[in-house]
């Protein structure tokens, strides 16, 4: 009788462990790095001066994604890193365009 409970316990434990490990996907390391690089480029281009709205939104999303990443919420972190990268790229592009139009970019 005792061995039946041990086997049942092992069986249930196995599926609990299997279920808990399958919920977490791979960490979005590439998206993290691309978002960070895009933010650095936007800051270097002086987007805080020319496209502050896009830059602030990129920074907000990046901080949110970092928090989600640290909490292993990889699905939402990946989505927000992608959005942060997009806003940072927009900030850099708008900045470069405004600098070019004003003659500052030459």
Image (spheres, rainbow, N blue to C red):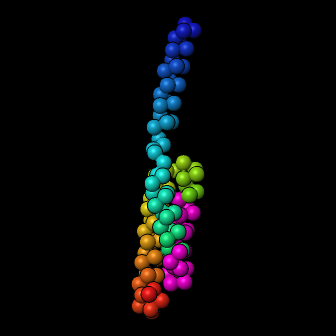
Work out whether residue 46 or residue 80 is closer to the camera in this orientation and state it: 46
- State the image coordinates of residue 28 (x, y, percent, origin top left): 46, 52
Is there any visible trace of residue 80 in the rendered image? no
Q: Nearer the viewer, residue 17 or 31?
A: 31
Image quadrant where one finds the C terminus: bottom left
Based on the picture, tell me whether residue 20 belongs to the magenta stretch. Answer: no
Image quarter where the N terminus lies is: top right
Above-or-below relation of 1 to 97 = above
Does residue 24 sit above or below 11 in this rendering? below
- Residue 68 drawn at (x, y percent): 55, 55
Q: Residue furthest front?
A: 106
Percent x, y of residue 77 = 49, 56
Can residue 46 be seen in the rendering of this structure?
Answer: yes
- Residue 82 lies, in percent from the top left, at 44, 62
Residue in the image at 58% along x and 51% along y: 70
Identify the residue at image location x=54%, y=83%: 49
Residues shaded magenta: 44-65
Q: Residue at x 41, y 84 (%)?
A: 97
Does 85 sit left or right of 59 as displayed? left
Magenta stretch, main secondary structure class:
helix
Above or below for 105 versus 23: below
């Amino acid at each position: 009788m005792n061995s039946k409970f041990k086997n049942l316990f092992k069986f249930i434990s196995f599926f609990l462990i299997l279920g808990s490990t399958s919920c977490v996907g791979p960490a979005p390391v590439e998206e993290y790095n691309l978002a960070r690089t895009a933010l650095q480029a936007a800051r270097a281009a002086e987007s805080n001066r020319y496209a502050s709205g896009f830059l602030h939104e990129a920074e907000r999303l990046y901080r949110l994604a970092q928090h989600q990443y640290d909490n292993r919420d990889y699905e939402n972190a990946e989505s927000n890193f992608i959005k942060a990268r997009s806003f940072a790229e927009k900030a850099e592009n708008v900045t470069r365009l405004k600098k070019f139009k004003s003659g500052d970019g030459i």
